[in-house]
Image (tube, rainbow, N blue to C red):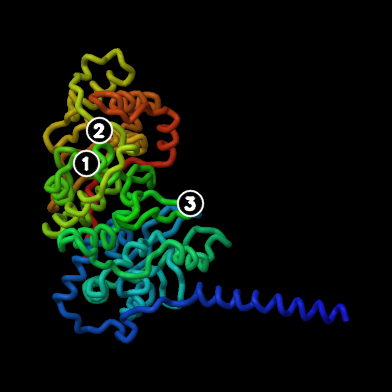
Amino acid sequence: MNNSRFARTAGWLALPCLVAAGLLAWYVTREPASPFEQEPAAQAGFDPALVSRGEYVARVSDCVACHSLPGKTPFAGGLEMATPLGAIHATNITPDPTHGIGAYSLADFDRAVRHGVAPGGRRLYPAMPYPSYVKLSDDDMRALYAFFMKGVQPASEPNIPSGIPWPLNLRWPIALWNGLFAPTTPYAAKPGEDALWNRGAYIVQGPGHCGSCHTPRGLAFNEKALDESGAPFLAGALLDGWYAPSLRQDPNTGLGRWSEPEIVQFLKTGRNKHAVVYGSMTEAFNNSTQFMADEDLNAIARYLKSLPGDPQRDGTPWQYQAVSAATRLDSPGAHTYVTRCASCHGLDGQGQAEWMPPLAGATSALARENASAINITLNGSQRVVAAGVPDAYRMPAFREQLSDREIAEVLTFVRGTWGNQGGAVDPQAVGKLRGHTDPASSSPIVLHMR
C-alpha cells in the first residue's frame, strides 16, 4: 500500500519535471523564425547592384576583420579569439558548400547572422555580434546574402574546433543566454528623431556593432546596454588589453570635446587634432570606416553627439596647463619622456598637427583605466592605411628598450602633466600586460574582401 502510494506520488512529481525538461529541450534546439522561410538557396542570377550593396553592408559590418587572415582567402576564417572559457576560431563564411555557407538558404543565413543559430539549431558563440546584427534590416540581410553567395570566392578551408573543454563547450546554455540578453527584432526608427539621427543609430547599434567593444559587459559577458536608453551604452570598456573609450559626450574620456566634423574626419582618415586610431580601432579603420559613405559617417557623428556624458564618472573637464617637460626633469619619468617621446609628441605634450597625436588631453592620459597607455607603449601601434597608403609614422614598441618601472614612470608623468588626471601607473600592471601581449606588426595589414 505504502509502496503504491509512493509510486503514484513519485509519478505525479516526475510529470512536471518531464514536461519542463521537454520544454527546455525544445527551447534550446528550436530555430528562430525568419521572414525568408520561403526563399530558395543561392541562385546564379543575383542582381549585380544587390551584390554591390551587400559588399557595402559587409564593409560597414566589418565582417572581414574576424573572418579573414592576412594572406589567406577572404572570409575563409581561422582567426583565433580568446574567451574566458578557452580559444575559439572564426569560421569559414565563403560560399564553399562543405566547409563554408554555400548550402545556406537565405533563411539559414538570416538565423545565423541575426540570431546566432546555425542550421540544425546549433548555437553560435556570442563572440559573433548577433545581439547587434539582429538590428540589420531585411533589405540589408538580402543584400549581404547576395554578396557572400556571389561576390566572395569559395574556399575549402576546414573550420577549426574550439579549444573550450567539455562540458563548458556544450552550446545549449547559449539559448538561455540569448533569451536573457539578445534582442530579437530589427532596428525600428525612433519617433521624434530625424532620418539622419535614425540612420546613425541604425549603423552604430546594428552593423557597426560599436557596443561590442565600447560598452561594458556584465558577469555573463553581456553588453550592459544595447542602445541609448541605457546609460552604460558606449560608456567605455576594457577589452583584450585595451580600453575602448567612451563614445558619449564625456569631455575627458569620450567625445565631448569633438565636433561632428571631427568625428567624421577621424572615421574617414584615421586621425584628427585630438587623436589617431590605435589598438583594435586601427583594424576597424583600415577595413571598415574609411570605406563608408560620407552621409553615413555624418549620421554616425550626429547620433554619437546626442548621447549624454556622465560628469560623475568623467570628472572635472580637462583644461590644458602649459608646461615644458624639459623643466620637469626632476620628476620620475620626465627624462625618459624628453629622450624617448618628445620628438614626436612635443615637450608641451601637444603633438604635431594631425600626424603625431597630442598626449595633453588624450583619453589614455585622462581615463582611470590605464591599459591602453601601457599597451601602446609596450607594443606600439599597427600601421594606419588610408586610401591604400600606409602611414609613414607609427608608434614604436618600447618593450625591449624600457623596463616595467621606466614605462610606469613615464606614463605616470604623462598622466599627471599638462592638466592630465589619469593617475599613476604601477610597474606590476606593466609587467602583467607585458606577459599577455605581443608587439604590434610593423607591416601594413589590410584585409581584402575579394
In the image, 319: left or right of 110? Answer: left
Identity of the residue drawn at 28% across and 59% down: 205
Percent of width and height locating residue 178: 44, 65
Q: CA distance from mark 1 to mark 3?
A: 29 Å
With respect to residue 160, does 354 lie above or below?
Answer: above
With respect to residue 306, does 17 lie above or below?
Answer: below
Q: Secondary structure at mark 2?
A: loop
Label 2: few (<14), some or many (≥20) within 10 Å?
Answer: some
Q: Nearer the viewer, mark 1 or mark 3?
A: 1
Q: Residue furthest right?
A: 1
Find disc 2 in the rendering and name its residue: 317
Find disc 3 in the rendering and name its residue: 219
In primary-sequence order, the first of circles 1 and 3 is 3
Q: Is there a contact, CB below 8 Å, between mark 1 and mark 2? A: yes
Check disc 3 and give the amino acid type.
Leu
Q: CA distance from mark 2 to mark 3?
A: 31 Å
What numbered label is drawn on residue 331?
Answer: none
Q: CA distance from mark 1 to mark 2?
A: 9 Å
Check disc 2 and give the amino acid type.
Pro
In primary-sequence order, the first of circles 2 and 3 is 3
Q: Which quarter of the image is occupied by the N terminus?
A: bottom right
Percent of width and height locating residue 211: 32, 54
Check disc 1 and give the amino acid type.
Gly
Give the image quarter of residue 332: top left
Q: Is there a contact, CB below 8 Å, between mark 2 and mark 3? A: no
Specify whether residue 32 is in view: yes
Q: Which quarter of the image is occupied by the C terminus?
A: bottom left
Give the image quarter of residue 382: top left
What numbered label is drawn on residue 256?
Answer: 1
